[in-house]
């Protein structure tokens, strides 16, 4: 089995989903954001999780897309909060329509996510929805924490890891757990799948922080140094603030408090501070730590070795990505 088979199945089903028709101002934005593309790694994880335990992995397609619709709902609302002009290189929904439309369309996407998740066998419905509801609330908790961090300079590494666990990683864990549930895996195995997905997700987000500073602009797909320009509390900045002393601390504080500056110059200067403090190596070590944990979780999953290899290879692509 190739991941391309799963991707094609997801894309075919995605094109057939009808979110609603009238009024078009409510439903057109949903179709718009869902057609912007993306990695689709969450629904892919669900299909791979189901394939570990059943040949009938197609029954996981619509629930998997429920996770993807929910993910895009969070992106739509995040863009409003961030006042982001672009999403995947195209105007965001609130820019193309307006903020009120984006809020309401996002609300309907959440409803649609639940409707898609209803496409599971009756005996699995309660745990699927219960776990999803908890996960959805945790994603919102993580977003609120991220917003709280904007006005704080004392964010600890532990707090930051907990924030990205909630905002990003729990949904990756749930996507994989959902596949296991649909495939008929027992409670212990689905727990290992969840924890494996969550640990890989934390590593994935830390890798994103690292690539924002040290990525190849031609491969990264967005502005390198954007987090530095925005003073975003990433793992790298939090560690630099914790370790910087003396003149290095003074220089970093100066760049963080300037209201007017040359953007490329700030990126070069702060990156140089990270280099002096060994922040890149520290981040890479922490990324590796979470990926090792994730693969250890997958080792505990009792499933066909060839099918499990497919999942592990996909996870390794996340580890080694450059964009």
Image (cartoon, helix red, strand yellow):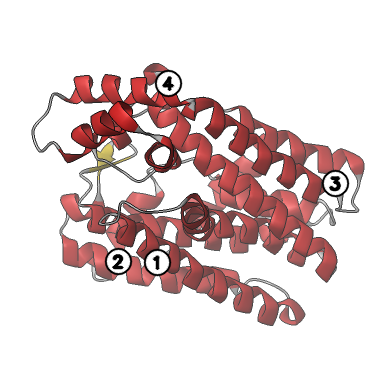
**Would you name the residue on which mark 2 appears?**
105
Answer left or right for 253 relative to 43: left
Of labels 3 and 1, earlier in sequence is 1
> Callout 2: helix, strand or loop?
helix
Closer to us: mark 1 or mark 4?
Answer: 4
Tell me residue 37's x, y (percent). 43, 41
**Would you name the residue on which mark 1 appears?**
109
Q: Is residue 209 above or below residue 194?
A: above
Of labels 2 and 4, earlier in sequence is 2
How far apart are the two marked residues, 2 and 3, measured between alpha carbons? 41 Å
> Callout 3: helix, strand or loop?
helix
* Mark seen at residue 274: none
How far apart are the two marked residues, 1 and 2, measured between alpha carbons? 6 Å
How far apart are the two marked residues, 1 and 4, measured between alpha carbons? 43 Å
The residue positioned 40% from the left and 65% from the top of the image is 19
Q: Nearer the viewer, residue 5 or 199?
A: 199
Closer to us: mark 2 or mark 3?
Answer: 3
* Mark seen at residue 299: 3
Of labels 2 and 3, earlier in sequence is 2
How far apart are the two marked residues, 2 and 4, measured between alpha carbons? 44 Å
Of labels 1 and 4, earlier in sequence is 1
> Callout 1: helix, strand or loop?
helix
**Would you name the residue on which mark 4 appears?**
275
Tell me residue 85's x, y (percent). 20, 44
Q: Nearer the viewer, residue 252 or 247?
A: 247
The residue positioned 31% from the left and 37% from the top of the image is 227
């Amino acid at each position: 089995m190739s991941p391309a088979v799963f991707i094609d199945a997801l894309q075919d089903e995605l094109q057939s989903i009808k979110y609603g028709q009238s009024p078009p101002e409510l439903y057109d934005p949903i179709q718009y954001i869902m057609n912007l593309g993306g990695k689709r790694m969450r629904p892919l994880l669900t299909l791979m999780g189901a394939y570990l335990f059943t040949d009938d992995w197609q029954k996981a397609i619509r629930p998997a897309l429920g996770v993807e619709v929910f993910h895009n709902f969070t992106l739509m609302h995040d863009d409003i909060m961030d006042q982001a002009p672009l999403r995947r290189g195209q105007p965001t929904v609130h820019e193309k329509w307006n903020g009120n439309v984006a809020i309401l369309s996002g609300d309907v996407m959440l409803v649609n996510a639940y409707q898609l998740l209803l496409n599971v066998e009756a005996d699995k419905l309660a745990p699927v929805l219960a776990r999803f509801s908890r996960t959805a609330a945790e994603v919102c908790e993580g977003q609120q924490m991220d917003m709280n961090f904007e006005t704080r300079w004392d964010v600890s590494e532990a707090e930051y890891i907990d924030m990205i666990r909630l905002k990003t990683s729990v949904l990756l864990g749930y996507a994989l757990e959902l596949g296991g549930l649909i495939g008929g895996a027992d409670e212990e195995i689905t727990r290992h799948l969840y924890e494996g997905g969550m640990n890989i997700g934390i590593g994935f987000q830390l890798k994103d922080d690292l690539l924002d500073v040290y990525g190849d602009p031609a491969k990264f797909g967005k502005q390198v140094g954007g987090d530095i320009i925005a003073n975003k509390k990433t793992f790298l900045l939090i560690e630099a603030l914790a370790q910087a002393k003396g003149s290095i601390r003074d220089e970093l504080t100066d760049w963080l408090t300037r209201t007017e500056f040359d953007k490329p110059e700030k990126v070069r200067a702060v990156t140089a501070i990270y280099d002096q403090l060994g922040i890149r190596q520290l981040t890479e070590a922490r990324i590796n730590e979470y990926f090792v944990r994730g693969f250890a979780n997958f080792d505990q999953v009792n499933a066909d070795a060839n099918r499990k290899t497919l999942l592990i290879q996909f996870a390794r692509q996340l580890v080694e990505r450059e964009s």
